[in-house]
Image: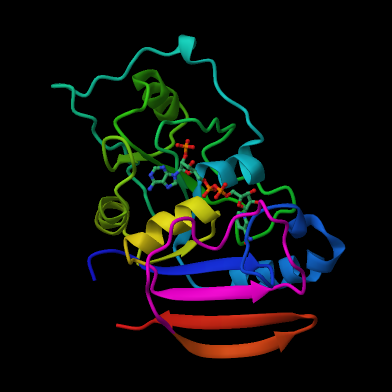
Amino acid sequence: MNRPYIICHMVTSLDGKVTGEFLSKDECAEACQVYYEINRNLKSNGFICGRITMEGSFTGGYYPDLSRYEPVRHGCGLKTDFVLDDMTGFYAVAFDPKGKLGWGSNRIIDPDGDPGYDGAQIIEVLTEQVDERYLAYLESMEIPYIFAGEDEIDVELALFKLKNIIGCETLLLEGGSVVNGYFQRADVIDELSLVVAPIVAGKDDKPLFTDSSLADFELVNAEKNGTNLVLNYKRKK
Ligand SMILES: NC(=O)c1ccc[n+]([C@@H]2O[C@H](COP(=O)([O-])OP(=O)(O)OC[C@H]3O[C@@H](n4cnc5c(N)ncnc54)[C@H](OP(=O)(O)O)[C@@H]3O)[C@@H](O)[C@H]2O)c1
Protein backbone atom coordinates (compact mmCIF):
# COMPACT_ATOMS: atom_id res chain seq x y z
CA MET A 1 0.00 0.00 0.00
CA ASN A 2 1.49 3.29 -1.08
CA ARG A 3 0.00 5.25 1.81
CA PRO A 4 -0.25 4.82 5.59
CA TYR A 5 -2.87 2.48 7.06
CA ILE A 6 -5.63 4.77 8.38
CA ILE A 7 -7.61 4.13 11.57
CA CYS A 8 -10.42 6.62 12.15
CA HIS A 9 -10.76 6.86 15.94
CA MET A 10 -13.72 8.91 17.27
CA VAL A 11 -16.26 9.36 20.06
CA THR A 12 -19.79 9.34 18.65
CA SER A 13 -23.22 10.01 20.08
CA LEU A 14 -25.97 7.39 19.82
CA ASP A 15 -27.13 9.12 16.64
CA GLY A 16 -23.67 9.05 15.04
CA LYS A 17 -22.67 12.68 15.60
CA VAL A 18 -19.11 13.70 16.47
CA THR A 19 -19.21 17.47 17.08
CA GLY A 20 -21.03 19.76 19.46
CA GLU A 21 -22.21 20.24 23.00
CA PHE A 22 -22.78 16.54 23.77
CA LEU A 23 -18.99 16.04 23.97
CA SER A 24 -18.70 18.29 27.03
CA LYS A 25 -21.70 16.81 28.92
CA ASP A 26 -21.14 14.67 32.04
CA GLU A 27 -22.77 11.71 30.26
CA CYS A 28 -19.92 11.79 27.74
CA ALA A 29 -17.01 12.21 30.17
CA GLU A 30 -16.41 8.49 30.60
CA ALA A 31 -16.54 7.97 26.81
CA CYS A 32 -13.84 10.61 26.39
CA GLN A 33 -11.64 8.86 28.96
CA VAL A 34 -12.12 5.51 27.18
CA TYR A 35 -11.31 7.27 23.89
CA TYR A 36 -8.00 8.66 25.23
CA GLU A 37 -7.09 5.30 26.76
CA ILE A 38 -7.62 3.52 23.42
CA ASN A 39 -5.75 6.32 21.64
CA ARG A 40 -2.70 5.74 23.84
CA ASN A 41 -2.74 2.01 23.06
CA LEU A 42 -3.24 2.18 19.29
CA LYS A 43 0.16 1.72 17.66
CA SER A 44 0.71 4.46 15.09
CA ASN A 45 3.16 7.05 13.79
CA GLY A 46 0.83 9.87 14.81
CA PHE A 47 -2.57 11.45 14.32
CA ILE A 48 -4.28 13.61 11.70
CA CYS A 49 -6.83 16.34 12.47
CA GLY A 50 -8.62 19.00 10.47
CA ARG A 51 -7.78 22.67 10.94
CA ILE A 52 -10.82 23.35 13.17
CA THR A 53 -10.03 20.48 15.55
CA MET A 54 -6.37 21.49 15.80
CA GLU A 55 -7.44 25.06 16.59
CA GLY A 56 -9.93 23.95 19.26
CA SER A 57 -7.65 21.40 20.90
CA PHE A 58 -4.14 22.81 20.57
CA THR A 59 -3.59 26.32 19.17
CA GLY A 60 -6.47 28.21 20.81
CA GLY A 61 -6.76 30.52 17.79
CA TYR A 62 -3.24 32.01 18.05
CA TYR A 63 -1.95 33.41 14.75
CA PRO A 64 1.50 34.88 14.04
CA ASP A 65 2.03 38.40 12.70
CA LEU A 66 2.98 37.51 9.12
CA SER A 67 4.21 41.06 8.38
CA ARG A 68 7.39 40.02 10.23
CA TYR A 69 8.21 37.40 7.58
CA GLU A 70 9.50 37.60 4.00
CA PRO A 71 7.68 35.42 1.45
CA VAL A 72 9.42 32.10 0.78
CA ARG A 73 9.91 31.59 -2.94
CA HIS A 74 11.01 28.15 -4.02
CA GLY A 75 11.47 29.16 -7.66
CA CYS A 76 9.22 29.03 -10.75
CA GLY A 77 6.19 29.70 -8.55
CA LEU A 78 6.19 26.05 -7.45
CA LYS A 79 5.69 25.32 -3.79
CA THR A 80 8.25 22.90 -2.38
CA ASP A 81 7.90 20.65 0.66
CA PHE A 82 9.97 21.44 3.75
CA VAL A 83 11.14 18.60 5.98
CA LEU A 84 13.70 18.38 8.75
CA ASP A 85 16.84 16.22 8.61
CA ASP A 86 15.70 14.06 11.49
CA MET A 87 12.09 13.06 10.78
CA THR A 88 11.63 10.13 13.11
CA GLY A 89 9.07 10.24 15.85
CA PHE A 90 5.39 10.72 16.54
CA TYR A 91 3.53 13.23 14.37
CA ALA A 92 0.57 15.60 14.69
CA VAL A 93 -0.55 16.11 11.09
CA ALA A 94 -2.64 19.25 10.55
CA PHE A 95 -4.85 19.43 7.44
CA ASP A 96 -4.66 23.22 7.13
CA PRO A 97 -5.17 24.10 3.43
CA LYS A 98 -4.71 27.86 3.68
CA GLY A 99 -2.23 27.95 6.59
CA LYS A 100 -4.54 29.33 9.27
CA LEU A 101 -2.97 27.62 12.28
CA GLY A 102 -0.57 29.48 14.55
CA TRP A 103 1.72 27.27 16.59
CA GLY A 104 3.71 28.39 19.64
CA SER A 105 6.11 25.47 19.27
CA ASN A 106 6.94 22.80 16.69
CA ARG A 107 5.60 20.13 19.03
CA ILE A 108 2.16 19.57 20.55
CA ILE A 109 1.94 20.73 24.15
CA ASP A 110 -0.99 18.83 25.62
CA PRO A 111 -2.36 20.55 28.75
CA ASP A 112 -2.73 17.16 30.49
CA GLY A 113 0.61 15.82 29.22
CA ASP A 114 -1.29 12.94 27.57
CA PRO A 115 1.37 10.72 25.90
CA GLY A 116 -1.09 10.10 23.03
CA TYR A 117 -0.56 13.74 21.97
CA ASP A 118 2.07 15.51 24.06
CA GLY A 119 5.39 16.09 22.29
CA ALA A 120 4.13 15.07 18.83
CA GLN A 121 6.08 16.76 16.01
CA ILE A 122 3.69 19.01 14.05
CA ILE A 123 3.45 18.60 10.25
CA GLU A 124 1.36 21.05 8.21
CA VAL A 125 -0.42 19.80 5.09
CA LEU A 126 -1.06 22.80 2.83
CA THR A 127 -2.42 23.78 -0.57
CA GLU A 128 -1.19 26.39 -3.01
CA GLN A 129 -3.62 28.89 -1.45
CA VAL A 130 -1.18 29.50 1.40
CA ASP A 131 0.49 32.90 1.96
CA GLU A 132 4.21 32.47 1.27
CA ARG A 133 5.02 34.45 4.41
CA TYR A 134 3.32 31.65 6.36
CA LEU A 135 5.92 29.26 4.92
CA ALA A 136 8.68 31.51 6.27
CA TYR A 137 6.96 31.46 9.66
CA LEU A 138 6.77 27.63 9.62
CA GLU A 139 10.41 27.34 8.59
CA SER A 140 11.47 29.73 11.37
CA MET A 141 9.59 27.47 13.82
CA GLU A 142 11.11 24.31 12.27
CA ILE A 143 7.63 23.02 11.45
CA PRO A 144 7.74 20.70 8.42
CA TYR A 145 5.14 21.23 5.69
CA ILE A 146 4.02 19.34 2.61
CA PHE A 147 1.92 20.52 -0.31
CA ALA A 148 -1.01 18.47 -1.57
CA GLY A 149 -3.35 20.21 -3.99
CA GLU A 150 -4.24 23.61 -5.38
CA ASP A 151 -7.46 24.61 -3.56
CA GLU A 152 -8.49 21.57 -1.57
CA ILE A 153 -6.15 19.04 0.01
CA ASP A 154 -5.76 16.03 -2.24
CA VAL A 155 -6.01 13.33 0.45
CA GLU A 156 -4.34 10.61 -1.62
CA LEU A 157 -1.37 12.83 -2.50
CA ALA A 158 -1.01 13.94 1.13
CA LEU A 159 -1.01 10.31 2.30
CA PHE A 160 1.46 9.30 -0.42
CA LYS A 161 3.86 11.98 0.83
CA LEU A 162 3.30 11.13 4.49
CA LYS A 163 4.36 7.58 3.73
CA ASN A 164 7.14 8.17 1.23
CA ILE A 165 8.70 11.40 2.51
CA ILE A 166 7.99 11.19 6.25
CA GLY A 167 7.83 7.39 6.60
CA CYS A 168 4.41 6.99 8.27
CA GLU A 169 3.09 3.42 8.16
CA THR A 170 -0.03 3.89 10.31
CA LEU A 171 -1.87 7.10 11.19
CA LEU A 172 -4.92 7.78 13.32
CA LEU A 173 -7.58 10.01 11.79
CA GLU A 174 -9.10 11.88 14.72
CA GLY A 175 -11.64 14.28 13.27
CA GLY A 176 -13.58 16.27 12.98
CA SER A 177 -16.47 15.51 10.68
CA VAL A 178 -15.21 17.49 7.67
CA VAL A 179 -11.71 15.99 7.43
CA ASN A 180 -13.15 12.52 8.14
CA GLY A 181 -15.54 13.07 5.21
CA TYR A 182 -12.68 13.90 2.83
CA PHE A 183 -10.93 10.66 3.84
CA GLN A 184 -14.11 8.59 3.58
CA ARG A 185 -14.87 9.89 0.08
CA ALA A 186 -11.28 9.15 -0.97
CA ASP A 187 -11.87 5.60 0.36
CA VAL A 188 -8.69 5.58 2.46
CA ILE A 189 -10.18 4.63 5.83
CA ASP A 190 -9.06 1.06 6.58
CA GLU A 191 -10.46 0.78 10.09
CA LEU A 192 -13.01 2.49 12.33
CA SER A 193 -12.55 2.64 16.10
CA LEU A 194 -15.65 4.15 17.68
CA VAL A 195 -16.57 4.87 21.28
CA VAL A 196 -20.34 5.29 21.36
CA ALA A 197 -21.47 7.46 24.29
CA PRO A 198 -24.97 7.02 25.77
CA ILE A 199 -26.23 10.42 24.64
CA VAL A 200 -28.05 11.94 21.67
CA ALA A 201 -26.52 15.03 20.04
CA GLY A 202 -28.19 18.30 19.09
CA LYS A 203 -29.74 18.85 15.67
CA ASP A 204 -26.96 21.08 14.34
CA ASP A 205 -24.12 18.73 15.28
CA LYS A 206 -22.17 17.01 12.52
CA PRO A 207 -22.01 13.29 11.68
CA LEU A 208 -18.96 11.02 11.66
CA PHE A 209 -18.42 11.94 8.00
CA THR A 210 -19.53 15.17 6.33
CA ASP A 211 -20.66 14.38 2.74
CA SER A 212 -20.03 10.65 2.87
CA SER A 213 -20.22 8.16 0.02
CA LEU A 214 -21.61 4.63 0.15
CA ALA A 215 -19.15 2.05 1.59
CA ASP A 216 -19.41 -1.08 3.71
CA PHE A 217 -17.41 -2.11 6.76
CA GLU A 218 -17.13 -5.43 8.58
CA LEU A 219 -17.66 -5.56 12.36
CA VAL A 220 -14.50 -6.96 14.00
CA ASN A 221 -15.22 -6.36 17.68
CA ALA A 222 -17.92 -4.91 19.92
CA GLU A 223 -17.62 -4.59 23.66
CA LYS A 224 -19.14 -2.73 26.57
CA ASN A 225 -16.76 -0.46 28.48
CA GLY A 226 -18.51 1.12 31.46
CA THR A 227 -21.53 2.98 30.10
CA ASN A 228 -20.13 3.00 26.54
CA LEU A 229 -19.93 0.72 23.54
CA VAL A 230 -16.54 0.28 21.84
CA LEU A 231 -16.82 -0.78 18.19
CA ASN A 232 -14.15 -1.84 15.69
CA TYR A 233 -14.80 -2.19 11.98
CA LYS A 234 -12.58 -2.92 9.00
CA ARG A 235 -13.25 -1.73 5.46
CA LYS A 236 -14.66 -4.55 3.33
CA LYS A 237 -12.48 -4.93 0.23
N1 LIG B 1 -16.00 13.14 18.61
C1 LIG B 1 -14.69 13.11 18.49
O1 LIG B 1 -14.04 12.11 18.78
C2 LIG B 1 -13.99 14.33 17.96
C3 LIG B 1 -12.64 14.27 17.58
C4 LIG B 1 -12.06 15.41 17.06
C5 LIG B 1 -12.78 16.58 16.91
N2 LIG B 1 -14.08 16.61 17.28
C6 LIG B 1 -14.89 17.83 17.12
O2 LIG B 1 -14.90 18.18 15.76
C7 LIG B 1 -15.14 19.59 15.67
C8 LIG B 1 -14.46 20.13 14.42
O3 LIG B 1 -14.87 19.36 13.31
P1 LIG B 1 -15.21 20.02 11.92
O4 LIG B 1 -15.82 18.94 11.11
O5 LIG B 1 -16.00 21.26 12.14
O6 LIG B 1 -13.78 20.46 11.35
P2 LIG B 1 -12.40 19.67 11.10
O7 LIG B 1 -12.64 18.44 10.32
O8 LIG B 1 -11.65 19.57 12.37
O9 LIG B 1 -11.63 20.74 10.20
C9 LIG B 1 -12.17 21.08 8.96
C10 LIG B 1 -11.23 22.00 8.24
O10 LIG B 1 -10.02 21.32 7.93
C11 LIG B 1 -9.57 21.72 6.64
N3 LIG B 1 -9.57 20.53 5.78
C12 LIG B 1 -9.54 19.26 6.21
N4 LIG B 1 -9.43 18.40 5.16
C13 LIG B 1 -9.39 19.15 4.06
C14 LIG B 1 -9.26 18.84 2.67
N5 LIG B 1 -9.13 17.59 2.20
N6 LIG B 1 -9.25 19.85 1.79
C15 LIG B 1 -9.38 21.12 2.24
N7 LIG B 1 -9.51 21.48 3.54
C16 LIG B 1 -9.49 20.49 4.44
C17 LIG B 1 -10.47 22.87 6.21
O11 LIG B 1 -9.87 24.03 6.76
P3 LIG B 1 -10.21 25.56 6.34
O12 LIG B 1 -11.54 25.85 6.99
O13 LIG B 1 -9.10 26.34 6.91
O14 LIG B 1 -10.30 25.60 4.83
C18 LIG B 1 -11.76 22.48 6.90
O15 LIG B 1 -12.68 23.55 7.08
C19 LIG B 1 -14.58 20.18 16.94
O16 LIG B 1 -15.55 21.00 17.51
C20 LIG B 1 -14.28 18.99 17.85
O17 LIG B 1 -14.91 19.11 19.09
C21 LIG B 1 -14.70 15.51 17.79
Quarter holding residue 33: bottom right
Q: Residue furthest right?
A: 26
Up-down relation of residue 179 to residue 224 (above or below): above
Q: Residue at x 49, y 51 (%)?
A: 178
Identify the image quadrant of residue 81. Answer: top left
**Which quarter of the image is occupied by the C terminus?**
bottom left
Quarter of the image where one finds residue 102? top right
Residue at coordinates 69% horizontally, 73% vertically from top-left?
14
Outermost top residue: 67
Above or below, 195 against 101 in this view is: below
**Residue 227 or residue 90, whichever sits in front:** 227
The answer to whether 185 appears left or right of 193 in the picture is: left
Asked whether the viewer can see residue 153, the reply is: yes
Magenta part of the chain: 189-217
Residue 171: x and y in percent read: 43, 64
Prevalent SS, magenta region:
loop
